[in-house]
Amino acid sequence: MFGGGEVICGVCQFVHASLGSYRIMEYEDFPIISQMCHEVYSKVSDSPGFYTHLRTLSPKDGLLLATTYLMLGHGGDLLRMANNIIKLRQLQLLEKQIQIHQHTLHTQSQYHHNNGKHHRGDMVYKGPATTTDGMRIQVLTLSMDNFISLPKQTILQFLNFVFGTNLSDEMKEEIALGYEEMYYKKVNEGDEHITSLVVNGGISKSSNGTDAAPAATSEEKKKTDMTELEQSLRENVLFGRVMGNIKNMVDEALRGVHNWY
């Protein structure tokens, strides 16, 4: 499943050095998640694949299976995301340490008078380290929620980070507006690959194409169902802890702080 135990073992070795060090996830969690996945998967013995399972299992079991896939399946997106945050932060800290060394210590290049305190070869303090503006390695963390609710503003934030003053404000505005228009066009067309919070036309459609319940009623039920599913995941002894740790890390990265380091 998901490529077999070898894949899960590979994921363990790849991310545990980072996630385990910051107590995001323990090594013992991996086999427990794998066993949990097998138990859920075996509930539908005649199903040939992952997506068929999702359509057949109960919503809560389907959520457990999907969460396992996002953690340990091909790509391991959730754990890889947390691992990337840690590795990028470590890289930034390494650069900062190098800058501190280069800008606070240097070899005296000329002789001082004999009555001075410093002699050739002494290491001398030159002042505070450079600010983050001078850092070559800079990281921008963006929230998917902002891409959904504020597409234009989020793209502008991205363009300002990448191009700075090398791209005119007019061009940035044009690009961001074009993205926003494309995004809402796909949302309104019901593109299944686009995540959104928009209800098309105020009326949802049933599977046979007829008008279903009013959007407000349908959305209220959907929100209730999602709340219950989220709560079931939070209450899961293992997933609740691991997902909570990852969420805290992502929230801190979005705020630009790193209390976990």
Image: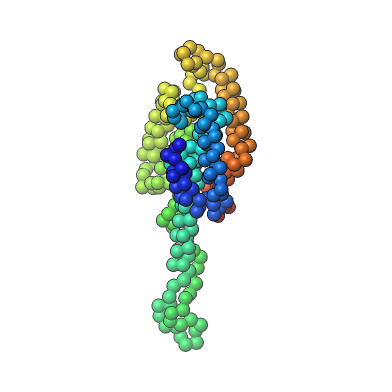
Q: Can residue 80 be seen at all in this image of the molecule? A: no
Quadrant in which the C terminus appears: bottom right
**As displayed, is residue 114 above or below residue 178?**
below
- Name the spot of residue 253 as percent of width and height, x first: 52, 47
Query: Is 204 in front, or is 71?
Result: 71
- The residue at 48%/21% (across/down) is 200
- Name the spot of residue 159 as percent of width and height, x first: 41, 42
**As displayed, is residue 117 above or below residue 23?**
below
Quadrant in which the N terminus appears: top left
- The residue at 61%/37% (across/down) is 236
Q: How many marks?
A: 0
Residue located farthest toward the bottom when viewing the structure as drawn: 114
As drawn, is 222 to the left or to the right of 95?
A: right
Q: Can residue 166 be seen at all in this image of the molecule? A: yes
Say how the picture is coloured.
Answer: rainbow
Query: Is 67 in front, or is 206?
Result: 67
**As displayed, is residue 179 above or below residue 15?**
above
- Name the spot of residue 88 as percent of width and height, x first: 46, 52
- The residue at 55%/15% (across/down) is 213
